[in-house]
Image: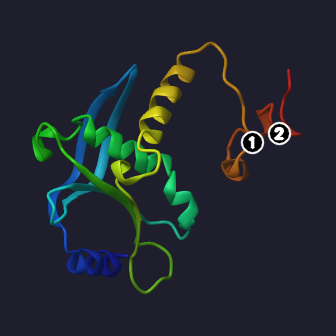
Amino acid sequence: MLRRYVGYRDSNARQLVAVEISGRADVGRARLSGQVDRIERDADGGFVVIDLKTGASAPSKVDLLRHPQLGAYQVALEHGAFRDETGAEPMSAGSALVQIGGTRIKALSQPQVALSMDDEPDWAENLVRDTADGMAGDRFLAKVGSHCNTCPVRLACPAQPEGDRE
């Protein structure tokens, strides 16, 4: 993993801005807070949030288009979560998962385009706001998804045949 990371770092044309940086941003009634692995600046002055992944699996190209984690990183960045490093009004140039785990020879960079370049530029902010509204509600709708295969509460989930429906 270290070799793959160093290979990524050394071949990357973007400028390193910050490593393992914490941030917080309010988006409507949501508060996004956490730590990102890297923030890099591209040649045009835009910022890219990088998440290093040490697992063996990687999402598909289609899943990257609306990857919630990467979208939330961009929303947090644009709402000033990292303003000490990026300035008050940073421009997102996208985000990326960098896969350094598994058996691959080189790191695999999986970028998500900048929200401003997306056909639906508000999708990630809408997701954050809608999630916060849902979490503030008194009921949660259980939905079946690809995450169900590894969910630790599958046996208690009303959306599953084996789940508790009462």
Of tags 1 and 2, which is closer to the observer? 1
Q: Determine whether 74 is above or below 159 in the image.
A: below
In the image, 148: left or right of 16?
right
Sequence-earlier tag: 1 or 2: 1
Q: Mark 2 points at which residue?
A: 160
Query: 150 and 16: which one is in front?
Result: 16
> Which amino acid type corresponds to the residue marked 1 in the rendered image?
Val
In the image, 42: left or right of 5?
left
Q: Mark 1 points at which residue?
A: 144
Counting from the top left corner in percent of width and height, residue 65 is at: 50, 56
Residue 63 in view, yes or no? yes
| Identity of the residue drawn at 69% across and 52% down | 146
Counting from the top left corner in percent of width and height, residue 78 is at: 26, 40
> Which amino acid type corresponds to the residue marked 2 in the rendered image?
Gln
Counting from the top left corner in percent of width and height, residue 130 is at: 52, 27
Q: Locate residue 134: give its quadrant.
A: top right
Give the quadrant of the C terminus: top right
| Identity of the residue drawn at 34% across and 54% down | 114
Are circles 1 and 2 on residues that touch, CB within 8 Å? yes
The CA distance from mark 1 to mark 2 is 7 Å
Q: How is the image coloured?
A: rainbow
Residue 59 in view, yes or no? no
Which residue appears farthest toward the top when viewing the image? Answer: 138
**SS for callout 1:** loop
Query: 93 and 98: which one is in front?
Result: 93
Q: Determine whether 7 is above or below 26 in the image.
A: below
Disc number placed over residue 93 in the picture, else none: none
Total marks shown come to 2
